[in-house]
Image (tube, rainbow, N blue to C red):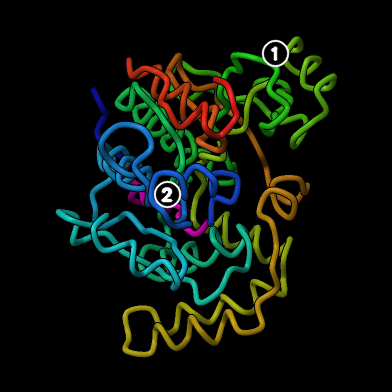
Amino acid sequence: MIPTPVREDGELWAIVLAGGEGVRLRGLIRELYGEERPKQYAVLTGEKSLLRQTLDRVALLIPPQRIVIVTQASHAGYLGPELAGLPEVQVLAQPSDRGTAAGVLMPAHWIQARAPRAIVAVFPADHFILEEAVFMGHVDTVARFVRAHPDWLVLLGAPPTEPDPDYGWIEVGARVGWAGQAPVHWIRGFREKPTEESARRLFALGCLWNTFVFAASVATLVDAGQKCIPLLHERLVHLSEFVGTPYESRALRHAYLFAPAANFSRAILESSAISLAVSRIPPVTWSDIGTPERVARSLCALGVPPPAWLASLGTGA
């Protein structure tokens, strides 16, 4: 059962990151759809697109009016069908791709203008999770920790099932607190796409996969942007003056016109400007849908036989 969402010192909001192009799955998408649509708008596992699965999962905990999708203006033709039955979900269409830092920080500024004390949970739109209620219950628990310790940004780490060098890895440090009954650990370091040998060592040391799902206070996110990427902050900070006005879209276009491109993980998570921690997710079936092999494994987890297209792409599960 999902606990009652955080409300006391700031309601819980969600940012759903749906602005990527899914380059590594282009061959599979072309095989299935005859076009190169971004993977989050494709039905790859189950009967819904990855984005709609994410929205329905997030809505188990957070009401639609506090869910913000960050997408690209060029994705407008794919987005409409994904929002059926969710008219209150907010959509922020980026005029251009400025990297994951802008993808996280732009909606953080937008939310802060509406709810200055909000707690924000960030979700990529390309994950496969079977035990969704368990997963979202843990998100709620981590959000409650952040509400009590608003200076922390807490990532959710997945226990690895194999030494996969294609994932980002988190080196776990000392315990700094508890999220419910789950320990919260200081992050010793990150290893993004290590070598196979390094991945085997990280696996043996008990390191975690970085899901890039995390919770933080909106004020901490905005402050991190100001400290780590001041040029991007300067472009975004004035958006708050136009949120909810007829000039909001124009202000967003203007902000992105000269905004620098930056990667959130490299610029912020790997800096020392904020307090970073990780909480291990409970035993759930989780995968980042980044390769055809992971799509096939997710289908197998659903009890679906390996699809014919897997052989046609020359890959194996």
Q: Quadrant of the N terminus?
A: top left
Residue drawn at point x = 56 percent, y = 35 percent: 291
Residue 287 or residue 39, whichever sits in front: 39
Residue 152 or residue 103, whichever sits in front: 103
User: What residue does disc 1 label?
Assistant: 206
**Relative to 74, 10 lies left or right:** left
| Mark 2 burial class by Cα count in 10 Å: few <14, some 14-19, many 20+ | many
Q: Main secondary structure of the magenta part?
A: loop
How far from the left and from the top, in percent, is residue 146?
Answer: 49, 39
User: What residue does disc 2 label?
Assistant: 40
Residue type indicated by callout 1: Gly
Residue 193 or residue 209, whichever sits in front: 193
Residue 164 or residue 150, whichever sits in front: 164
Quarter of the image where one finds residue 233: bottom right
**Relative to 41, 96 lies left or right:** right
Residue 54's disc is: none
Find the residue positioned furthest to the front. 312
Asked if residue 1 lies in the magenta stretch, the reply is no
Looking at the image, is 156 positioned above or below residue 238?
A: above
Q: Magenta segment range?
A: 6-20
Residue drawn at point x = 64 percent, y = 23 percent: 208
Q: Quadrant of the C terminus?
A: top right
Quarter of the image where one finds residue 316: top right
Q: Is residue 190 visible?
A: no
Looking at the image, is 16 positioned above or below residue 298?
A: below
Report the Cα–Cα distance between label 1 and label 2.
Answer: 30 Å
Looking at the image, is 2 positioned above or below residue 126?
A: above
* Mark in the foreground, 1 or 2: 2
Residue type indicated by callout 2: Gln
Element at label 2: helix
Element at label 1: loop
Residue drawn at point x = 30 percent, y = 46 percent: 52
